[in-house]
Image: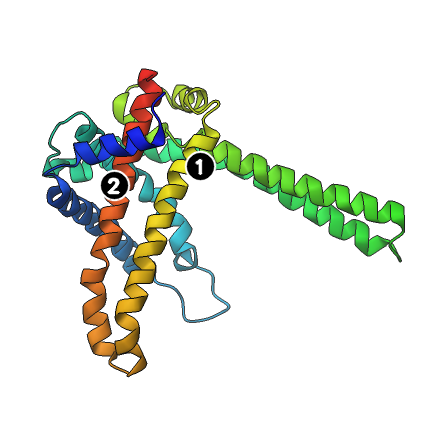
Amino acid sequence: MMTLYEIKSEARDNLKKKWLFSAVIFLIVAIVFFLFVAIFMSIFPIPTSNYTLSLGDLGLPIWILLIYPAVRLSFSNIYLKITKSEKPKISDCYSGFKLYWKVTLLSFVRLLLVLVWLVLAYLSTMLNMIFIGITSGLSQTQMLISSVFLLLFIFLVGVAIWKNVRYNQIFFLLSDNPKMKIRDLIKKSNELMSGNFWKNFLLNLSFFGWNIVVFIGIIVVISPFYTVGNYGFVSVLLWPLLLPFIFVHIYSLVSKAVYYRTLSDGK
């Protein structure tokens, strides 16, 4: 199995002379993503009344459920091609929408498999609150029971996070195997991630550090202009300063594609 250093090193090798093109592809996919969101929000605007519930109130969840899976699959197609030393095409920017219904259903099934554990965690909290409410005082036994409920809540949330990680290869798998059944994609992702939770965590953590560094750099650059009230210049300056975030994200996605290759090829 490749080390994290080898995975990231291979990702950088795959991106040689492709950074700019990858950034353009990323921006095109992002524009497609936000275009769909803008269309949805224009059709179902957020109501001004606090007493009216409409689809606008559910904009973000519906956006994630209906649009994000196809966009995520497009990214998977693009960056898997890069790991194969293939040059992505502009048409790859919307390639995920060719399997729209399948990838949306796949993402929904994954969400349900994780939500089951979160719902159980919520129920354990409610039971704990009911238990505390019906007891007039907290004896040592009652405190012990309450602590058990708390530990149960932590355990169930931990299981939900663990399950979510186990299923995080489904988009790469679908990209590689577009005819594979949804059940088999979930099962295969679960198998690939078996025993690799910690390595996956460290890989994501390494890019979190880079994002923090970039964020601090942006704050350092714009803070002098912000403090003197030059907000217009700050808004103009902010856009080019976001480019490092894009490059870090591309680096992260290609590294995850390489990581998927190491899992699927058994390297």
Which residue sits at x=14%, y=27%? Answer: 85
Amino acid carrying label 2: it is Tyr
Q: In which quarter of the image is residue 82?
A: top left
Q: Is residue 150 at all visible to an observer of this figure?
A: yes
Q: What element carries label 2?
A: helix
Q: Which of 54 and 86 is in front in this view?
A: 86
From what the image shows, is residue 171 above or below residue 217?
A: above
Q: Which of 11 and 58 is in front in this view?
A: 11
The CA span between labels 1 and 2 is 16 Å
Give x and y (percent) for residue 144. Answer: 82, 44
If you read the primary sequence from the N terminus, does the residue marked by circle 1 or circle 2 appear first? 1
- Viewed as shown, does residue 25 lie left or right of 160? left
Which residue sits at x=26%, y=68%? Answer: 221
- Residue 227, disc: none
Q: Mark 2 points at which residue?
A: 251
Determine crowd level at label 2: few under 14, some 14-19, many 20+ residues with C-alpha closer than 10 A: many
Q: Is residue 178 at all visible to an observer of this figure?
A: no
Q: Which of 126 and 260 is in front in this view?
A: 260
Quarter in which the C terminus is drawn? top left
Give x and y (percent) for residue 126. Answer: 70, 49
Q: Name the residue under label 1.
A: 201
Give x and y (percent) for residue 166. Answer: 46, 29
Q: Is mark 1 on a helix, strand or loop?
A: helix
Amino acid carrying label 1: it is Phe
